[in-house]
Every structure is written in C-alpha cells, then in structure tokens.
Image (cartoon, rainbow, N blue to C red):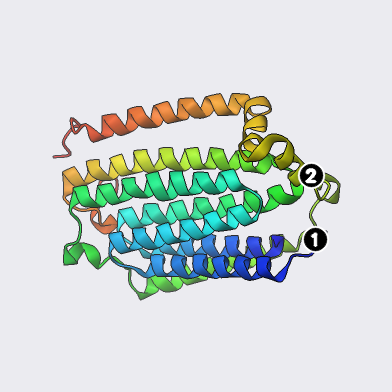
Amino acid sequence: MEPHYPLFYVFHFYLFGVIALASALAFVTRKSPVAAALWLVNTMFSLAALYVMLDAQFIGVMQVLVYAGAIMVVFLFVVMLLNLGHPSELADARGLGWRLAAGLVGLGLLSEIMIILRAKLPQQLIVPRDFNEQQLQKLNAVGTVAAPLFKDYLLAFELTSVLLLVAIAGAVILGRGRTVSAR
Amino acid sequence: MLAESLALTAALFIIGVIGVLVHRNAIIIFMCVELMLTAVNLTFVAFSRFYGTAGQVFVVFVMTVSAAEAAVGLAIIIAIFRHRQTINLQDINLLRG
C-alpha cells in the first residue's frame, strides 16, 4: 500500500516527529505561560514541516501563518495584558492525585486509539498512488485545497464565515467590560 | 508514513489531554486544547495522502474553528480576570452550588 520512501525522507520525517513530540512534552511541563506558548510554537513549526512532507504544502503554510503566527500571538497578547507571572499564578500544577488520574486517563485513551488503529482501513476508497501528485501538477498547491473547498464544500465554507462573525461579535461583547458585576 | 503519523497524532493528543487535566492555569489549558486540535489536523493530512485531497479541506475548517474558539475563550478569560483577578481554575467557582 505504501510506496518505498528514500532514507533521506524517512530520517527527516522521524526528526521532525521527535522534535514535535519533545516540544509538546516540554510545553506541557512548563509552569510559565510564555515558555509554554513558545514550546507550543515549536511544535506547530515541526508539524508544519511534517505537513509539507506529507504533500500538503498549503496546509503547512496555513499552519505557520494561522497557528504559529496568529493564534499564538493572541495567547501571548492575553498573557501580556493580564500581566501574569506572579509566583502564586505560576504554581499551577495540580496535586499528585490529579496527576495520577490524568496519567490513567491518558493510558486509557492511548490503548483505545491503539485498538482503533488495528482496524482495517477501507481499501476501496483509496485513491491511486499518484492521484495526489497529479492533482498537484494539475491544480498546484493552493488549487488542491481551493477546488474542493469552493465546489463540494461551499455551504460549509459559507457557514464558517458565519461562525467567524459570531466569534468576533462574542469576543467584542465579552471583552468590552460592561458585563454585570458578580457582586 | 501513515502509521508513524497516526502514532504521533495519538501521542500529541494524549499530551494535550493530560495537560488539560493537570494544569490549573486557564491560558495553558486553552493552549492544550489547541494542541489537541492540531494533532487531529495531522490525522487529516496523513489520511489525505491515501484517500484524496478532500481531507485537507477539513484541516482548513478545523483551523477556523480553533481560531474562533481561541478568540471567544480568551475574551471569556479576560472577563473572568476582570471579576476575580485570577485565572486559576480553582478560584473560579461562580457556578458551583
């Protein structure tokens, strides 16, 4: 099913995979929100490299622009705005019981996913091996995403714009600060 | 490379889940949710290699949803911070009876 990959490709695939995994681990163990955000940006970058290696160049660019560029900047902006960094705010990890429970939940989810991965993939849906390359040749990197987006999934795309509008309105109303006081 | 991608996805997703459970800082919890969404994106891209490029379209949708979620969630965090002067989830118990 899978074609043979050159050693160069496999080496870099594993390299970026290990970088992503190590950055994610470093991210989840940080106490400071700024350090955590920077490690998460590192994870996003290596995932973008993996997208490019998996023939999804446009998605890789979007990953860098939207995730690493926009969303993480919003996070850092909020950290700056709230002026976090007091020692009381930094001691944020829960106790040992919570950590054990989290580890158990993680193990349970991992075994579940492993069982799901054992399932046989539907063979009749698999496209011919050079289908994606042909699409890339024919429509180029942006067109392979844009053509189905504006033909098959046009309604979903338009509804996405409504979602964004709602999100903008909600963020403005929540952030305006004329909410009713709790006291 | 499909099996490796799926294993990496599973690992990243579970790291995100554990982060949500372990941390008490609301901003870090939001970042863990972003990590989970990104892990799912990697699944879409890995499968799109074998099942056609339509999977990449769904990545665009997931990115949009996560951007909207980040905007609204951070606005909520700011609103809560204005009330309580903290974003530690243990001190935010307005809805607890």
Q: Position of residue A168 (x, y in %)?
A: 36, 30
Query: Is the Cβ of the residue at disc 1 closer than 8 Å to that at disc 2?
Result: no
| Disc 2 chain ID | A
Q: Nearer the viewer, residue A3 or B81?
A: A3
Q: Amino acid at mark 1?
A: Pro
Residue B60 appears at what percent x and percent y?
55, 39
Tell which of A111 and B54 is nearer to you: B54
Residue A137 image-quadrant placement: top right
User: Does any portion of residue A109 appear in the rendered image?
Assistant: no
- Counting labels gives 2
Residue for point 51% across, 52% down: B38
Mark 1 or mark 2, which has the lower sequence index?
Answer: 1
Q: Residue at x 66, y 38 (%)?
A: A140
Is residue A135 left or right of A40 when viewed as pictured? Answer: right
Q: Determine crowd level at label 1: few under 14, some 14-19, many 20+ residues with C-alpha closer than 10 A.
A: few
State the residue lying farthest toward the right: A124
| Marks 1 and 2, how far apart at CA | 13 Å
From the image, tell me which residue sits under label 1: A3
The residue indicated by pointer 2 is A131
